[in-house]
Image: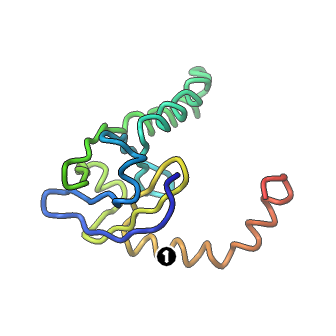
């Protein structure tokens, strides 16, 4: 399970360190793709396979399914975690997520996310104010 929030910097060579607590679960190779809310998603290969298996069940005849698959798969790269525990963030992903120097890596159970630090702060400030109503909505559908 990937949990927690870690602040790191992107170095001059566009590499970011993966938290040591996550490295065993992530393995030596991960998939990094465009995520929702303009962040990046990081998947260990096993979780990526589960996720893509679900996407494979979507109808190719449906425009929304095609568009989402293009968004996810077209924005994905395999990244090796180097001996220092870092991955390379390609320019197109860095631009998509508006990543500057300081970033936050957030563990979201089976995947992790990379956010620009300022945007993460704005997002969490907004969501923290809504936590009670979100829990209530989830409770209505039996998820909480």
Front position in the image: 113 or 36: 113
Front position in the image: 60 or 136: 136
**Crowding near pointer 1: few (<14 within 10 Å), some, many (20+)?**
few
| Residue closest to the far left | 12
Front position in the image: 43 or 41: 43
**Residue 124 at what x, y percent from top left?**
54, 73
SS for dot 1: helix
What's the residue at 23%, 50% (across, down)? Answer: 88
**Residue 50 at what x, y percent from top left?**
54, 32
102 versus 35 height, above or below = below
What's the residue at 26%, 46% (across, down)? Answer: 81
62 versus 37 height, above or below = above
Quadrant where the C terminus is found in the figure: bottom right
Quadrant of residue 129 in the image?
bottom right
Residue hosting label 1? 122
**Residue 4 at what x, y percent from top left?**
49, 65
**Residue 79 at what x, y percent from top left?**
28, 41
What's the residue at 29%, 55% (across, down)? Answer: 94
What's the residue at 46%, 50% (across, down)? Answer: 35
Quadrant of residue 53 in the image?
top right
């Amino acid at each position: 399970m990937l949990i927690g929030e870690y602040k790191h910097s992107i170095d001059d060579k566009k590499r970011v360190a993966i938290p040591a607590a996550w490295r065993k679960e992530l393995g030596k190779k991960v998939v990094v793709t465009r995520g929702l809310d303009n962040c990046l998603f990081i998947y260990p290969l096993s979780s990526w396979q589960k996720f893509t298996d679900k996407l494979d069940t979507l109808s190719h005849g449906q425009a929304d399914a095609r568009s989402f698959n293009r968004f996810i798969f077209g924005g994905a790269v395999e990244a090796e975690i180097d001996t220092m525990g870092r991955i390379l963030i390609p320019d197109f992903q860095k631009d998509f997520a508006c990543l500057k120097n300081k970033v936050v890596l957030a563990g979201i159970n089976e995947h992790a996310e990379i956010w620009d630090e300022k945007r993460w702060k704005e997002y969490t400030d907004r969501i923290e104010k809504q936590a009670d109503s979100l829990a209530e909505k989830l409770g209505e559908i039996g998820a909480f």
